[in-house]
Amino acid sequence: MKYNLIVVGSGPGGYVAAIRASQLGLKTAIIERESLGGICLNWGCIPTKALIKSAEVFNYLGHAKDYGITVKEASADLAAVVKRSRDVAEGMSKGVQFLMKKNKIDVINGTGKLARGKKVEVTDDKGAVTTYEADNIIVATGARAKALPNIPIDGEKVIDYRKAMVPQKQPKSLVVIGAGAIGCEFAYFYHAMGTKVTVIEFLEQGLVPREDPEVSKELKRQFTRSGIDVMANTAVEKVDISGKQINVIAKDRKTGNVTEIQCDLVLSAAGVTSNIENIGLETLGIKTEKDKVVVNQWYETNVAGVYAIGDITEGPALAHVASAEAIICVEKIAGHHPQPLDYGNIPSCTYCQPEVASVGMTEEQAKAAGFELKIGKFPFSASGKAKAAGHPEGFVKLIVDAKYGEILGAHMIGHGVTDMIAEIVLARRLEATGMDLVKTVHPHPTMSEAVMEAAAAAYGEVIHL
């Protein structure tokens, strides 16, 4: 029952930590109370992308004539769409099971709780408690949907993202509260499947409010054009679920005007909150601030040998961040000398259509930091590949330091841009300049040419615009 490392939680932070630890020769165990892969693989990143792909295919069929193809009227089988999503998630979870066996990692099923003396008490589904001991412990318990005080999530009329992934029937109308990545992705999915969707966002910028304002504006234009109603700078005053239909009362924060929206279903997508309750942090005296565990750059808490990674620590609540933190944390435990994670170079992606991807500073942030800027922007309407694919919407925007050519930020909206942003992340890591992007030969025709063209636009050398 003694290990070099015990990991509590098997999401993209936890299972990656366990695998890297095994690779480095540490005897490792991982504790999971539900399914291996955590929220990301089972109820987040992966199954939502399966739903979105089904919606995208359905949308293509509805526009088949645009591609010179005649298709009889298509219909969506929601139950089959949901089943495909669940099958994809189950397959990925089984993949993690295989990786645990391959790397000789002990999987302990149950709910883990920290105990004194670098021990973890695990309660199984029958209530039996077993204690395990380790030289080091990593807590990676993730996050859950945030509950708002005036929005009662009853799981039937008002739901969170987990329920939104497995609808029993398609609602005729849906109000999505919150326009971040989760809200926008579900808004796109349900609308594409035939539901009337209204998105309400508290912040003035509206859709994807943490992105560059030009990206938010373009996404709103595309959502509105498709038939999704967007209400920005709007507070939800009340959600009345007493009647047959739900009544959402929303107030414009600028004008004070009140709007009442009747709908069949409400999705609360107002962010996430950390799972730090009832895991024994207080038993060991581990320091927390708000709902985050306080850690150093190697993810060690104030208690030696106890670490925390992922959504329960300060930083972006993203799967790829948790995985990166996991590797750094474990390599430090194993006596290696990893580099601290550069949180200024973390890509962000939203998988609605059009997709949104970004890294680094927005234009406003770069100006506020005192940089003199060169801004390059290239629309996909001028891209041969985008036009041929039937996706001319969106653009690539690059922000470059005028003095040294440093790539300060990149902001993209368009088809497939989530697969393009890594080029900029790598360029920034290697300290490439904007002119390096200009001189990098991109294959033609591709969507990625827009990166080269946007960089050229920043220097007044754009060819196809």
Image: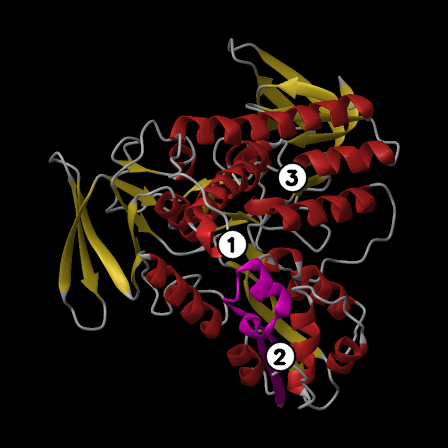
Label 2 to label 3: alpha-carbon separation: 31 Å
Callout 2 crowding tier (Cα within 10 Å): few <14, some 14–19, many ≥20: many
Label 3 to label 1: alpha-carbon separation: 39 Å
Magenta span: 373-399
What residue is disc 1 on? 67
**Placement of the N terminus among the 4 image quadrants:** top right
Whether the magenta-drawn stretch holds residue 113 is answered as no
In the picture, measured across the screen, residue 310 lies left or right of residue 422, that is left
Residue at left offset 41%, top offset 47%: 62
Tell me the amino acid under the disc marked 3: Pro
* Pointers 2 and 3 in contact (C-beta within 8 Å): no
Q: Helix or strand or loop: what does disc 3 sit on?
A: loop
Please report whichever mark, 2 or 3, sits nearer to the chain's N-terminal start: 3
The mark found on residue 12 in the picture is 3
Callout 3 crowding tier (Cα within 10 Å): few <14, some 14–19, many ≥20: many
Q: Helix or strand or loop: what does disc 1 sit on?
A: helix
Please report whichever mark, 2 or 1, sits nearer to the chain's N-terminal start: 1
Residue at left offset 85%, top offset 41%: 334
What residue is disc 2 on? 399
